[in-house]
Image (cartoon, helix red, strand yellow):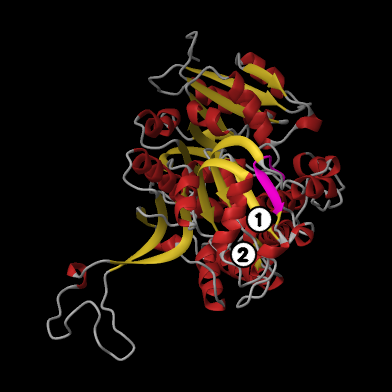
């Protein structure tokens, strides 16, 4: 291994009884052809075999994490914190590099600043279940994607800039998929994820059918948090089992059509999708007994815990109606009504796996430059039945009775918030904008601040840009001559207020008693984010777009 005092690459290996392949893994790491110096850190969660003896023989830096404290994210964070390298490489203790170029190929996209987080190809060995081979082929194709479009990532073979880890870290509460959670966060903040097919490892799993089921269950449980829009029902489960078994059998060569392979295919896919179904149906915190089941061999599984919004928190937040003298740079306003006319109870209705209001609230919490989120609502009691996020940024306000009802102008509600909370800039949006992204919110605030500081604008609001032929109801043209059809791109642009968001200051609002001031800037928001759910048709379209998100 390289022996420089300050290595530029830190290779981190999580272990729990990994003696079977660890020597081969560490020997292969030693033989890598790489231009950078590196160190190897092994973080162990309670091995009782020869894992630690082997690691000592290869002069690894050995760290320990207690069994009761273990999670995939926490163990990685502990190791990353102690790593010297500017680049962090992750490989599982039951994986072995395919060749001597594995490491260099993996870190090159980071060195070239093409991506922030990269993962490599995985293939199975001779003893790998046939169905798992098919999974490897699906998620780890022979062609690289640098960068890729979605946030799929896998820490069995990956590398990350340490500066990015320092900014975000791994989630320590998830039961798995900490890699995808981080990758999604990186993309939401404008970063890039990549896949390099030339960096290959053998990934060896030797699991019982119970362990296969448990692995997919805990990953599905984590996926509930990362992608709550993914729903697996009984019909899906049966369809997935049947179709995957059929495809696996069809891919077998004639000489491989034997009872052993057929039995393995059936049992693997059955346990895969049964575990996925069970995990998808769970909505709970992980208990100590569940931790034993998911991370360690155990015969029991913990009981589910419901997460309830504490009565004390509701009382505390709902009492915040007095004037706040604290000056905040940016305050987000998120008004929320209990009742709605065209889509009954839409703010609290299940939208792709969770209440509609959750989507925009979670996105606002992601925006670091937003100091406070004010929820002005007449539905505090209803919020108690939902898992509202417990975050210091959120202030829940009970709406005054004189401001309740469908006929009250939204400008009156905004005026009430401004009088009670002193901010420099206000970002106002609605619960009916679930597709609005972190990137768009951040960019719009940056545009507003830049132009407002120059005195060019006093407010900003989101619009849809249109270059098409408009007609009045009587058939008369509005913006073109039907006898002289010029290309639509040459027509005058028209702009539609889409109600996604508004940005303004106290001075601008007080002058106009409106969220749109005298010198507004029209911010064209992405079409894919611009649906404001007002009617049932909007709801169906928005939910379809959420379901059809491209993750890869």
Q: Is residue 22 above or below residue 59?
A: below
Camera-near label (2 vs 1) is 1
Residue 388, percent from left and from top? 72, 52
Q: Answer yes or no: is residue 62 visible.
A: yes
Secondary structure found at label 2: loop
Q: Looking at this rendering, what residue extends furthest in the left direction?
A: 484
Q: If you read the primary sequence from the N terminus, does the residue marked by circle 2 or circle 1 appear first?
A: 2
Determine the residue positioned at 57% across, 55% down: 414
Instruction: Determine whether label 2 and label 1 are within 8 Å by CB.
Output: no
Q: Nearer the viewer, residue 189 or 524?
A: 524
Q: Residues within 10 Å of mark 2 (few under 14, many from 20)?
A: some
Instruction: Tell me which segment is drawn in magenta.
Output: 390-397
Is 394 within the magenta? yes
Q: Is residue 455 above or below residue 134?
A: above
Q: Looking at this rendering, what residue extends furthest in the front direction?
A: 511
Q: Answer yes or no: is residue 505 visible.
A: no
Residue 538, percent from left and from top? 52, 73
From mark 2 to mark 1, how far is it between C-alphas?
A: 24 Å
* Residue at numbered disc 1: 376
Q: Seen in the image, is 539 located left or right of residue 99?
A: right
Q: Is residue 461 above or below residue 159?
A: below
Q: Seen in the image, is 431 located left or right of residue 190?
A: right
* Residue at numbered disc 2: 352
Q: Nearer the viewer, residue 525 or 184?
A: 525
Residue 94, quarter of the rendered image: top right
Q: What's the mark number on residue 106?
A: none
Determine the residue positioned at 40% across, 23% down: 33
Residue 188, percent from left and from top? 49, 46
Q: Residues within 10 Å of mark 1 (few under 14, many from 20)?
A: many
């Amino acid at each position: 291994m390289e022996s420089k005092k300050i290595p530029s690459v830190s290779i981190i290996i999580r272990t729990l009884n990994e003696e079977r392949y660890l020597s081969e893994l560490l020997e292969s790491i030693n033989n890598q052809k790489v231009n950078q110096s590196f160190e190897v850190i092994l973080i162990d969660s309670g091995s009782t075999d020869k894992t630690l003896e082997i690691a000592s023989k290869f002069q690894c830096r050995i760290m320990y994490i207690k069994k009761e404290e273990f999670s995939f994210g926490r163990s990685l964070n502990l190791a990353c914190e102690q790593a010297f390298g500017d680049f962090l490489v992750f490989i599982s203790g039951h994986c072995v590099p395919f060749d001597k170029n594995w490491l260099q190929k993996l870190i090159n996209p980071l060195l070239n600043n093409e991506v922030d987080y990269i993962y490599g190809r995985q293939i199975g060995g001779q003893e790998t279940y046939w169905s798992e081979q098919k999974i490897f082929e699906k998620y780890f194709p022979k062609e690289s994607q640098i960068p890729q479009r979605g946030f799929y990532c896998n820490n069995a073979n990956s590398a990350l800039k340490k500066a990015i880890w320092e900014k975000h870290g791994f989630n320590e509460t998830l039961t798995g998929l900490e890699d995808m959670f981080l990758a999604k966060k990186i993309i939401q903040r404008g970063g890039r994820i990549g896949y390099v097919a030339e960096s290959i490892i053998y990934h060896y799993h030797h699991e019982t059918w119970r362990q296969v089921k448990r692995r997919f269950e805990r990953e599905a449980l984590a996926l509930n948090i990362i992608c709550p829009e993914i729903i697996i029902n009984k019909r899906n489960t049966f369809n997935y089992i049947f179709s995957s078994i059929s495809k696996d059998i069809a891919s077998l060569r004639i000489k491989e059509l034997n009872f052993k392979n057929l039995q393995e295919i059936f049992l693997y896919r059955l346990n895969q999708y049964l575990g996925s179904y069970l995990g998808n149906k769970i909505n709970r915190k992980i208990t100590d007994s569940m931790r034993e089941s998911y991370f360690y061999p155990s015969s029991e599984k913990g009981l589910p815990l419901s997460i309830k919004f504490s009565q004390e928190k509701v009382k505390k937040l709902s009492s915040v109606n007095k004037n706040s003298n604290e000056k905040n740079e940016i305050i987000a306003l998120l008004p929320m009504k209990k009742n709605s006319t065209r889509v009954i109870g839409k703010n609290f209705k299940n939208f792709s796996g969770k209440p509609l209001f959750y989507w925009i609230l979670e996105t606002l919490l992601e925006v670091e430059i937003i100091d406070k989120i004010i929820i002005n609502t007449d539905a505090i009691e209803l919020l108690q039945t939902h898992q509202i996020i417990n975050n210091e940024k959120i202030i829940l306000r009970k709406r005054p009775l004189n401001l309740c009802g469908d006929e009250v102008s939204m400008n009156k509600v905004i005026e009430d918030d401004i009088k009670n909370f002193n901010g420099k800039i206000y970002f106002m949006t609605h619960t009916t904008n679930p597709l609005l992204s972190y990137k768009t919110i951040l960019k719009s605030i940056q545009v507003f601040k830049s132009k407002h500081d120059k005195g060019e604008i006093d407010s900003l609001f989101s619009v849809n840009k249109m270059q098409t032929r408009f007609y009045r109801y009587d058939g008369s043209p509005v913006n073109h001559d039907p006898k002289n059809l010029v290309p639509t791109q040459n027509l005058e642009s028209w702009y539609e207020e889409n109600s996604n968001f508004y940005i303004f200051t106290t001075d601008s609002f007080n002058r106009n008693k409106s969220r749109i001031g005298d010198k507004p800037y029209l911010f064209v928001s992405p079409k894919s984010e611009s649906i404001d759910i007002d009617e049932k048709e909007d709801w169906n379209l928005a939910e379809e777009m959420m379901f059809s998100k491209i993750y890869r």
